Amino acid sequence: MIVWQKPNAFKILFTLRGSVIPHIYPQILFITLLSALISAVQHWIPSSFSSYSTAPFTLLGIALSLFLGFRNNASYQRWWEGRGLWGQLVFDARSLTRQVLSFINEETETGRHTQQCMIHLTIAFTHALRHRLRNTSPWQDVDRFVEPEHHISMRQARNLPEYLLRLMGKKLGYSRRQQLSSDLMIQNMDERLTSMTVVLAACERIQNTPLPFAYTLLVHRTTYLYCFMLPFSLSSSLGWATPLVCGVIAYTFFGLDALSEEMTDPFGVAANHLPLTALSRTIEINLLEALGENDLPPDIIPKNGCLQ
């Protein structure tokens, strides 16, 4: 995620970090060159292209803008929902840790071990969820927080975060049987696990449910057709200014299309995706500090204005 403050007027024109230009410059270049070619033909061979009214393109441009705006709103809603879910996870992890440390009896070795296991499993769940959403290998981050006796069964689990939630549920059941906490507090802690399960299911829903393909295809086709036909309409009236105007319009429409496509899946590693690594590290630091550990990992800091 880009964390730069608003750049000045000069940087706005030339900043590429976080911009969609690297993804759409071939389309912009093609439309600009096509416009230049059409302008040259119209200049050297007048009346090569009939003077069409720009009214149809104005109406089509308005309709295309509405389509792109709706699609961008839908994509941003998915991005913001994903951020809200990870904010809920931060809340649940901290609340569960506070309850575990406050209401599980720590006067016995069993109680202290249960507290540590519950907090470590919460950290492991956070890392496992991030890796599941990004389709990356989780073992380097997860193994150190899970007891070795569970490593084999953990690797056989098809849904690692859900497996870790089951382990945490078993720990709560064990705490109840050993009378390490009251039934009421066990129930309250189980509600935090239920909330974490909701976060997992909602994140999977966002990741596994793309925007309708037919709608995406319609926007793609209309954008390309509009930008391809526009120079033929403008060349007779704008002359050599046609490439500049068409290039700016192509940048706007192709840029909106590419940005909405990028934000459809908010859990990736692109510049405009959510900083899941930083959020996971924040949870890890907070929970280890609450557990009383001093060897804490460093905070994730932005690199070139981008927070992963």
Image (tube, grey):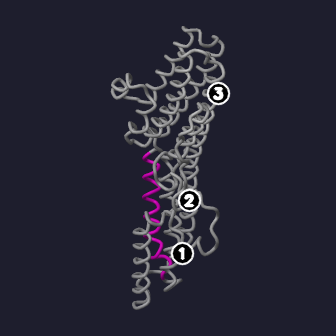
User: Majority secondary structure of the magenta segment?
Assistant: helix
Q: Which residue is mark 3?
A: 98
Residue 116: x, y in percent?
53, 25
Separation of marks 3 and 2 at Cα, in angstroms: 53 Å
The segment highlighted magenta reads 213-235
| Comes first in the chain, label 3 or label 1 | 1
Q: Which residue is mark 1?
A: 53
Secondary structure of residue under mark 1: loop
Secondary structure of residue under mark 3: helix
Q: Foreground: 143 or 72? A: 143
Which three-letter amino acid code belongs to the residue tagged 1? Ser
| Comes first in the chain, label 3 or label 2 | 2
Q: Residue at x 39, y 41 (%)?
A: 135
Q: Are marks 3 and 1 in contact (CB under 8 Å)?
A: no
Residue 17: x, y in percent?
51, 64
Q: Foreground: 87 or 115? A: 115
Q: Which residue is mark 2?
A: 63
Q: Are marks 1 and 2 in contact (CB under 8 Å)?
A: no
